[in-house]
Image: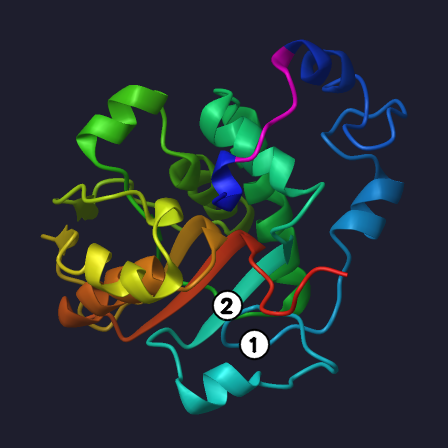
Amino acid sequence: MPALERPILPASRWSTLWPGRCAHCEARSSQPLCNACLQQDLPLRPRCPRCGVGVAQDGQICGHCLLHPPRWVGALTLGDYRFPNDQFILRMKFGAEPAIGRWFGDLLGARWLDAGLPLPDRILPVPLSRERLRERGFNPAWEMARRIAKRLDRPADPHALQRVRQGIAQSKLPLDARKRNIRGAYACQTRLDGKSVLLVDDVMTSGATLAEATQVLLQQGASTVRVAVALRTPLDPAP
């Protein structure tokens, strides 16, 4: 079963845990996770600077990126896409919880500054198709991007990058089919000559979506593209 189709916390239970309670331990908290659970479940740990996957030591580039360097120059993520953190993504996407996206954005913005990463000239969300946007009522990537922009004090634009072809949901496809499925799905009418861009999405799995969007931005003149995602699907099997 694809990860995004796993059962999610019932809305009634979620509402009893947050915002007044931590979603993982039920301690009183003004945020989805209390400070203790945040440090335990979304800890700072060594990650590949190119794709965000967990590695043994700081600065180490993972084997996949050594063999197949991504089109973007760097990536930042909060943690692994696995239980229990995946429940935040499921609630955000399928439970109409845009506030979770804003929380992710605040965390990513803070970690970006703490890591001393270069400030981008533009911050852009990976867009949804019109059909998916009408279905969900909001774009989770935009909820994240606008809060990152506020933290970094940089401009964000929800319209520069457009989804022009829907296709099959990436989560429903095997990894080797995702690149073909997403090809030609994005367009950008805004010139980005010499601008550095931060591209924001909720989850990175194969990286096909971010790679296709990055290619479009580079074709429009972007000097560099970095990516920020809430959660990264780990390459190693869960323990």
Is residue 121 shown to the viewer in this render? no
Give the side of residue 199 with respect to residue 134, left or right: right
Residue at far bottom of view: 67
User: Which quadrant is home to the C terminus?
Assistant: bottom right
Q: In the depicted view, which residue is nearer to us: 43 or 238?
A: 238
Residue at the (73%, 29%) spot, across then down: 31
Residue at the (36%, 33%) spot, across then down: 139
Name which residue type carries label 2. Ala
Residue at the (21%, 71%) spot, across then down: 218
Name the residue tied to disc 1: 49
Give the side of residue 21 with respect to residue 100, left or right: right
How far across and down, in percent of the image, does residue 158 sit? 29, 40
Q: Is the magenta region chiefly helix, strand or loop?
A: loop
Q: How many marks?
A: 2
Name which residue type carries label 1. Pro
Q: Are marks 2 and 1 in contact (CB under 8 Å)?
A: yes
Q: Secondary structure at mark 1?
A: loop
Q: Give above or below for 107 relative to 134.
A: below
Give the side of residue 11 with respect to residue 4, left or right: right
Q: Quadrant of residue 10?
A: top right
Q: Which residues are magenta?
A: 6-11
Q: In the depicted view, which residue is nearer to us: 81 or 33?
A: 81
Give the side of residue 13 with respect to residue 140, left or right: right
- Label at residue 75: 2
Q: In the depicted view, which residue is nearer to us: 81 or 133?
A: 81
Q: Give above or below for 179 relative to 224.
A: above
